[in-house]
Image (cartoon, grey):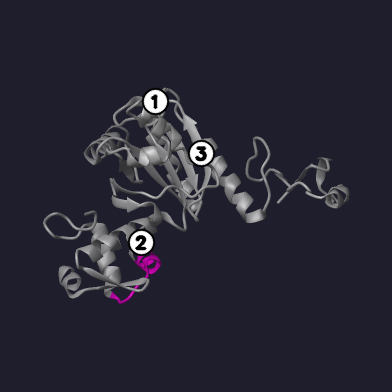
Amino acid sequence: MEEVREQVSRMPRLGEPAPAFEAATTHGMLKLEDFKGSWLILFSHPADFTPVCTTEFIAFAEIFPELQKRGVELLGLSVDSVSSHIAWVRNVEEKTGVKIPFPIIADLSKEVSLAYGMIHPGQSKTETVRCVFIIDPNQIIRTILYYPLTTGRNMDEILRIVDALQTTDKNAVATPANWRPGNPVVVPPPNTQEMAEERLKQGYECIDWYLCKKKL
Amino acid sequence: MACINPDGKPTESGTKMLRALKSGLGSPEEIAKEAGLPLFRVRSGLRELTQAGLANQKDEKYELTEKGTELIE
């Protein structure tokens, strides 16, 4: 019971520094700090040589060039060994022609999994659920997604979130529901009465003083 | 090690890093650009090369040691 509580209590949150780690990967020993200066998507999968995970890895490999264009690195993780990871990615390439270009952490000790709250005992006491941590160049956690073992993730949404976060950082704006690049963005709401009165005269597309959009 | 095979010979990425270091002191960013490797690989690789005595770190930059130079000649 204590161990389960300990596992559940370590859940990193948005806006916090990503927990540091040093881990064995398919590209050698890597530390979180090796990725400083780049955006990083750290994602976990339950197990190698399983069907949903394989479709996800193929999908991540397919968006990898788009992520690279955006200055984003990918880093996978499961509690399998390096040998298992190597055998699996070689099998994926042999059977589908898709090369997996990014490193995968072999988290046999579950040290990284536990630090990132990737083990959800209600789903599995031994395997990680499908997590996605989007970490910015200052190594702050900006988005966290948790998907169940049965549901593969959507790459379109992951790319959309990256675009939204980078747009926010570049332009000091927010992005509305279902936003896509090129769509109007949300102007930060006024935080004084004076600004609220001025807002409707500033030429934005407004529903009211607190909800205004603009084109970038 | 990711840069050096168990038989002591550098891997392809290890060779690229050692060759990039051959031209003199370099920061990880400069070496990554010269070697055409991702920055995270270079940072990790430089750590390994330094631990293996093939590179030296001076402040924020790296250079080949004599042992490292011999390996790529």
Chain assignment, label 1 = A
Q: Secondary structure at mark 2?
A: loop
Q: Identify which residue, B12 or A43, lies in the foreground.
A: A43
Q: Is residue B28 magenta?
A: yes
Label 2 crowding class (10 Å Cα cut-off): few <14, some 14-19, many 20+? some
The answer to whether residue A27 is left or right of residue A134 is: left
Q: Identify which residue, A99 or A175, lies in the foreground.
A: A175
Q: Compare marks 1 and 3 and give the one earlier in the sequence.
A: 1
Give me the residue at 61% from left, 53% from top: A169
Give amino acid for label 3: Ile
Chain assignment, label 3 = A
Residue A152 lies, with reference to residue B54, above or below; the image says above
Q: Identify which residue, B11 or A43, lies in the foreground.
A: A43
Is residue A99 shown to the viewer in this render? no
Which corner quadrant of the image does residue A106 belong to? top left
Instruction: Quickly name the residue at label 3.
Output: A144
Q: Is residue A130 magenta?
A: no
Discs 2 and 3 share one subunit: no
Q: Which residues are magenta?
A: B23-34
Q: Select label 2 or label 1 by which is in front.
A: 1
Instruction: Quickly name the residue at label 2.
Output: B36
Q: Secondary structure at mark 3?
A: strand
The answer to whether residue A4 is left or right of residue A157 is: left
Q: Select label 1 or label 3 by which is in front.
A: 1
Q: Secondary structure at mark 1?
A: loop
Where in the figure is residue B17, as x and y percent of width and height? 28, 64
